[in-house]
């Protein structure tokens, strides 16, 4: 793959690019590659990215008390029984 350097990026543009990359959870390099590919109509097709939304109605439905109860149960179950695992 080729490496291309871009000179002359002013601070305002650099700030906006970094902000956009951060908002999209991408590296600055990946953001710029995506922008260029989209501009030239050569976007990569996503082959293995499938979005599931079958559990969306459950998101955020626990109260803080329910969350603590469940989290305490999980934490309790994750404790190692030293008598079984250590000599």
Image (cartoon, rainbow, N blue to C red):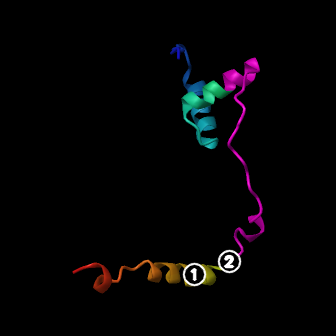
Residue 75: x and y, percent? 46, 79
| Number of other residues with Cα within 10 Å of mark 1, as a class: few under 14, some 14 to 19, many 20 or more | few
Of pointers 2 and 1, the one earlier in the residue sequence:
2
Residue 62 has which mark? 2
Question: Which residue is found at the position 78% from the left and 68% from the top?
Answer: 57
In the figure, residue 26 lies in which quadrant? top right
Question: Which residue is found at the position 77% from the left and 63% from the top?
Answer: 54
Residue 71: x and y, percent? 53, 78
Residue 1: x and y, percent? 53, 17
Disc 2/disc 1 C-alpha distance (Å): 10 Å
- Asked whether 26 or 9 is in front, the reply is 26
| Number of other residues with Cα within 10 Å of mark 2, as a class: few under 14, some 14 to 19, many 20 or more | few
Question: Which residue is found at the position 36% from the left and 79% from the top?
Answer: 80
Q: Is residue 87 left or right of residue 54?
A: left
- Asked whether 16 or 2 is in front, the reply is 2
What SS does tag 2 mark?
A: loop
Whether tag 2 and tag 1 are in contact, CB under 8 A, the answer is yes
Q: Is residue 51 left or right of residue 73?
A: right
What SS does tag 1 mark?
A: helix
In the figure, residue 59 lies in which quadrant? bottom right
Q: Nearer the viewer, mark 2 or mark 1?
A: 1
Residue 28 inside the magenta-drawn segment: no
On screen, 4 above or below 11?
A: above
In the figure, residue 67 lies in which quadrant? bottom right
Question: Which residue is found at the position 59% from the left and 30% from the top?
Answer: 30
Magenta part of the chain? 35-61
- How would you classify the magenta stretch by its main secondary structure? loop
On screen, 51 above or below 75?
A: above
Residue 70 has which mark? 1
- Asked whether 25 or 2 is in front, the reply is 2
């Amino acid at each position: 793959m080729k490496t291309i350097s871009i000179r002359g990026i002013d601070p305002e543009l650099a700030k906006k690019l970094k902000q956009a990359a951060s908002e999209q959870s991408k590296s600055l390099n990946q953001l710029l590659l995506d922008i260029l590919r989209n501009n030239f109509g050569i976007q990569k097709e996503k082959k293995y990215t499938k979005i599931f939304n079958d559990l969306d109605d459950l998101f955020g439905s626990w109260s803080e008390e329910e969350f603590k109860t469940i989290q305490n149960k999980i934490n309790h179950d994750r404790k190692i029984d030293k008598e079984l695992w250590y000599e």
